[in-house]
Image: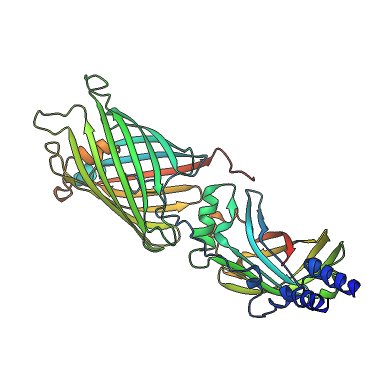
């Protein structure tokens, strides 16, 4: 009886480690635009993300205004001219891990999975598929990955005058450390 | 003992089951207060036309500004619509912090030198804060007459109160107090008050229509009139071009608010422009 009680107690205490959902409000999403004339880099450190370990469902959401740039003017142009963050304050991803069974969330390890779903930027949704790496260690899970975003796909117009300074496709980088919820 | 086991069973998995609603996965993070975001880009640059706008330079950004005000258009081709003559002002502005900027300038009108500080007191937010308020204080000195430096000084204090009503429309009030240590005539007041009003209408992503008007309230220097300007801001990458028409040849607060001579209605309209080029001197942390 005591053994059962102990087991139950422990399962209660450590239920975190086997939780069905993982998430954070402080994930990081960067993007890079590389051209011979100018490199542009921006960083958002207030990204919300949740993964449902059981179903493989994924949700990521961020405020466009939280992207910080090296140059204030870039940030201003990004918000005012390109992403129009007053009209479209959020960017979101809703999708699923295609092979959720490949991940043992309870065991330390590195898992390569593919995530696919809908990415919404600038009010436009597009289907995307990206390989991501999930690192489970000491009861935490880190998601890293890189995928390209073509600006034209999201109706983000770059005037010809600055077209040489802004890449047609920017690389988006994820570094999201999640805890069991 | 059984009860304890039962209780333990009851409580252990509840945290995971309680969140299994499928409507929004992000709800699992718990409720989050909607953040009140700062309202930015009330105006394109730190000046409406000649007058200060509510905008400050961000920390570590240097702005080099070149401004011209040409002669009046009314003489037509004989002086090429005023373009044969011009007053010029060169300015260097710098953002010390995101709230405090300073600047120095040299103007050919009365050979003035000037310096100023602009401080953000309140910043408009998406909720809870409907207005932005800044203080601007400037000192300027004429250097083209025989009077002493202190006699040629002017001190101007300005409160800037602005609201971005929408993506397209922003409005600003600029109550101004200006003190001249020396005025031309005995009858002239040493202190003048003006209530500046300015605004912008956004025409496209990169162009706005701006206007400013500075009526002097009460006594004014004899022979002067209120300054009026309308113009366009055109932004191209790191530059902002401001093209405008105004009756004021001066570009310091003392001169355009208090010393503008020549009414618009008498044909005293001048073409002018400002060019602003910003440079990032100190990069923000994390880059």
Residue reaching furthest bottom?
B22
**Quarter of the image with the N terminus of chain A in it:** bottom right
Camera sees residue B84: no
Residue reaching furthest left?
B187
**In the rendered image, the vertical position of residue B150 relative to residue B17, given as above or below:** above
Nearest the eye: A55 or B145: A55
Nearest the eye: B47 or B33: B33
Q: Position of residue B205 (x, y in %)?
A: 45, 61
Q: Which coloring applies here?
A: rainbow
On screen, residue B21 versus residue A79, left or right, reads right
User: Residue at 67% of width from left, 80% of height from top?
Assistant: B22
Q: Position of residue A77 (x, y in %)?
A: 51, 55
Nearest the eye: B227 or B36: B36
On screen, residue A128 versus residue B250, left or right, reads right
Q: Position of residue A31 (x, y in %)?
A: 66, 57
User: Residue at 54% of width from left, 57% of height from top?
Assistant: A78
**Quarter of the image with the C terminus of chain A in it:** bottom right
Q: Position of residue A135 (x, y in %)?
A: 82, 61
């Amino acid at each position: 009886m005591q053994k059962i009680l102990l087991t139950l107690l422990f399962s209660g205490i450590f239920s975190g480690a086997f939780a069905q959902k993982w998430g954070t409000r402080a994930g990081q999403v960067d993007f890079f635009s590389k051209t011979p004339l100018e490199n542009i880099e921006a960083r958002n450190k207030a990204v919300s993300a949740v993964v449902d370990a059981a179903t493989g469902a994924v949700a990521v959401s961020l405020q466009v205004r939280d992207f910080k740039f090296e140059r204030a003017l870039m940030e201003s142009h990004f918000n005012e001219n390109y992403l129009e963050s007053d009209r479209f304050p959020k960017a979101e991803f809703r999708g699923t891990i295609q092979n959720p069974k490949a991940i043992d969330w309870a065991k330390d390890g590195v898992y390569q999975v593919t995530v696919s779903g809908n990415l919404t930027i600038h009010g436009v949704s597009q289907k995307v598929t990206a390989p991501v790496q999930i690192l489970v260690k000491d009861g935490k899970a880190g998601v890293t990955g890189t995928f390209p975003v073509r600006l034209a796909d999201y109706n983000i117009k770059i005037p010809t005058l600055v077209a040489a300074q802004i890449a047609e496709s920017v690389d988006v980088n994820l570094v999201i450390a999640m805890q069991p919820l | 003992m059984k009860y304890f086991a039962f209780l333990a069973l009851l409580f252990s998995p509840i945290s995971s089951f309680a969140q299994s609603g499928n409507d929004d996965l992000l709800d699992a993070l718990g409720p989050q207060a909607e953040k009140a975001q700062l309202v930015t880009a009330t105006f394109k640059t730190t000046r409406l036309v000649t007058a200060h706008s509510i905008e400050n330079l961000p920390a570590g950004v240097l702005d080099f500004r070149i401004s011209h005000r040409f002669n009046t258009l009314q003489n037509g081709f004989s002086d090429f619509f005023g373009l044969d003559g011009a007053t010029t002002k060169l300015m260097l502005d710098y953002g010390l912090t995101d709230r405090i900027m300073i600047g120095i300038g040299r103007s050919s009108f009365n050979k003035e030198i000037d310096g100023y500080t602009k401080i953000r007191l309140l910043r408009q937010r998406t909720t809870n804060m409907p207005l932005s308020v800044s203080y601007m204080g400037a000192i300027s000195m004429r250097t083209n007459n025989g009077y002493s430096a202190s006699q040629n000084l002017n001190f101007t204090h300005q409160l800037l109160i602005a609201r971005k009503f929408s993506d397209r429309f922003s409005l600003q009030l600029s109550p101004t107090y200006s003190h001249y240590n020396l005025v031309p005539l005995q009858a002239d007041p040493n202190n003048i008050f003006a209530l500046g009003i300015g605004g912008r209408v956004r025409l496209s992503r990169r162009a706005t229509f701006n206007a400013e008007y500075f009526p002097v309230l009460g006594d004014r220097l004899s022979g002067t009139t209120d300054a009026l300007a309308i113009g366009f801001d055109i932004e191209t990458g790191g530059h902002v071009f401001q093209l405008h028409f105004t009756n004021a040849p001066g570009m310091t607060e003392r001169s355009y608010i208090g010393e503008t001579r020549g009414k618009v209605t008498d044909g005293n309209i001048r073409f002018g422009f400002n060019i602003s080029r910003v440079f990032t001197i100190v990069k923000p942390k994390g880059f």
